[in-house]
Amino acid sequence: MQVVVCIKQILDPEMPRSAFKIDSEKKRVVPPQGIPPVISPFDENALEAALRIKDEHKAKVIALSMGNRLSRPLLTKALAAGADELILLEDTVFEYLDSFASASVLAAAIRKIGVADIVFTGRQAADWDSGITGCAIAEELGLPCVTIARKVEVNRGQMRIERVIADGFEIVQAPLPCVITVDSDLGGLRHVTLQDLSSARKKPLQVWKAGDLNMSPPPPRCELLDLYVPKRETVCEVINGKTPEEAAARLADRLREEGFL
């Protein structure tokens, strides 16, 4: 069995608000100085799902990441956690793609890999939160897709999946091969030790360009109209009075004027 898990490098969503800057002309986020990127948290959940399948069924796990100027030390964490191989789709044309174009590139890479019994992605990336790419990969590959999984098992050539719904969870089955998007309810990525990081350096790491996939990303289907940091304005009005009773009466009058009473 061979499992492919897609992981995305993103800006740290826990960075200080003061470090978040936008180039309004280009409509892009400016990478902050001194704050390293991270793997999208839901993608770490997806990687953990793939590793649990490996633990139980001795599957081969291939981690796949796409972008430009990818951080080797960061993405090698997937190998340290237990993935058998890491493939970086790294090219200038792979930068700033929308969800649909990203899915097309990732699907092309999965076809090049050849065999993928299960494709895992996070339920959504923690930068744009679109939640589209996993389903779009399934559409590109012509595979069934199950979203927001919190538990996955392989049983007699089928997937048994618990997926999160509004009032709990439901259990569904899907044939192999299939695509599964993973929720945080599945659990966090296992702990990585220094020895794991050292061992990861000996595992295969490949870099594929657009030419290796014999494709160019398709044009975007989404148009970004504007990107900005919302302005937060706080107005504080102090209600005074000669006595507490007078201040309370003035406050009540003010609240009536604003329609709160």
Image (cartoon, rainbow, N blue to C red):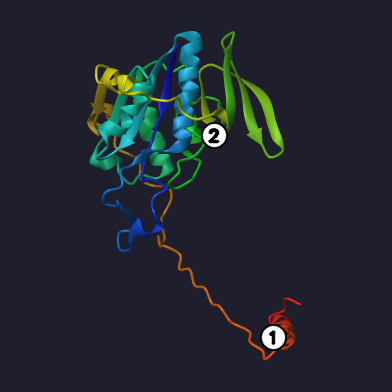
Q: Which residue is mark 2?
A: 184
Q: Earlier in the sequence, mark 2 or mark 1?
A: 2
Q: Vertical placement of 216 versus 79: above or below?
A: below
Report the front residue among 210 and 18: 18
Residue most toward the bottom?
242
Which corner quadrant of the image does residue 159 belong to? top right
Q: Under tag 2, what secondary structure?
A: helix
Q: Which residue is mark 1?
A: 247
Give the x, y percent position of residue 254: 69, 84
Q: Vertical placement of 103 versus 212: above or below?
A: below
The residue sitting at 56% across, 78% down in the picture is 236
Q: Vertical placement of 130 versus 253: above or below?
A: above
Q: Vertical placement of 260 versus 16: above or below?
A: below
The residue sitting at 27% across, 20% down in the picture is 198
Q: Amino acid at mark 2?
A: Ser
With 122 as the anchor, is 82 left or right in this view?
Answer: left
